[in-house]
Image (spheres, rainbow, N blue to C red):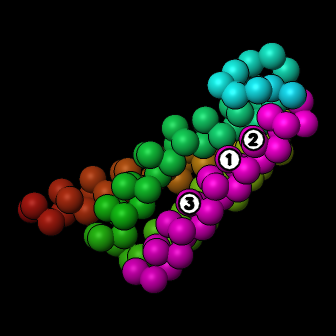
Amino acid sequence: MVWVDLVTLLAVLEFLGMAWLVGKARVRHKVRAPATTGNEQFERWFRVQQNTLETLIMFLPALWIAAHYWPPGWMALLGMVYIIGRVVYLFGYVRDPRTRGLGYWLSIVPVGLLVALGFAGIIKSLL
């Protein structure tokens, strides 16, 4: 489970990094808290952070549950695809939101697979 633990902490650090980048964008584009609109570039950074939060709350429990039933190293590998996908998503979305597709798919597909594997493990255990 050490690999799953590592991927979990990397995902949390990634999210913390995004929060820091949003803070920098807030200062750079002069968007004073609590505002979340007013500058399109800032809004892109902010949306990346919020979209990552939305996927993170699906990703983490799916990772942990799937790793409980299947080889943790393989589940951690799926988790790394998610983490890389979020970075690709960040660069695509900030550059041009229309180019976020690859990053989206690289992060949502692992979540879907982890959920499916979690359910499969549970069903296998119940039978």
**Is 107 placed above or below 100 here?**
below
Tell me the kind of residue under disc 3: Val
Q: Give the left or right position of residue 66, taking residue 38 as reference.
A: left
Q: What element carries label 3?
A: helix
* Boundaries of the magenta span: 1-29
Which residue lies under the disc numbered 1?
19
Q: Is residue 110 left or right of residue 25?
A: left
Magenta highlight: main SS: helix
Q: Which quadrant does the C terminus fall into?
A: bottom left
Helix, strand or loop at mark 1: helix
The residue wearing badge 3 is 12
At label 2, the amino acid type is Val
Mark closer to the observer (2, 3): 2
Crowding at dot 1, Cα within 10 Å, few <14 / some 14-19 / many 20+, comes out as: some
* Residue hosting label 2: 22
- Between 3 and 119, the one lying in front of the other is 3
Quadrant location of the N terminus? Answer: bottom left
- As drawn, 20 above or below 81: above
Would residue 67 appear left or right of 42 to someone viewing this image? left
Earlier along the polypeptide chain: callout 3 or callout 1? 3
Relative image position of residue 66 (x, y in whole percent): 35, 63
* Real-space CA distance between mark 3 and mark 1, rounded to the nearest whole angstrom: 11 Å
Marker count (numbered): 3
Q: What element carries label 2?
A: helix
**Place of residue 40 in the rendered image (x, y in percent of width and height, measured from the top left):** 84, 21
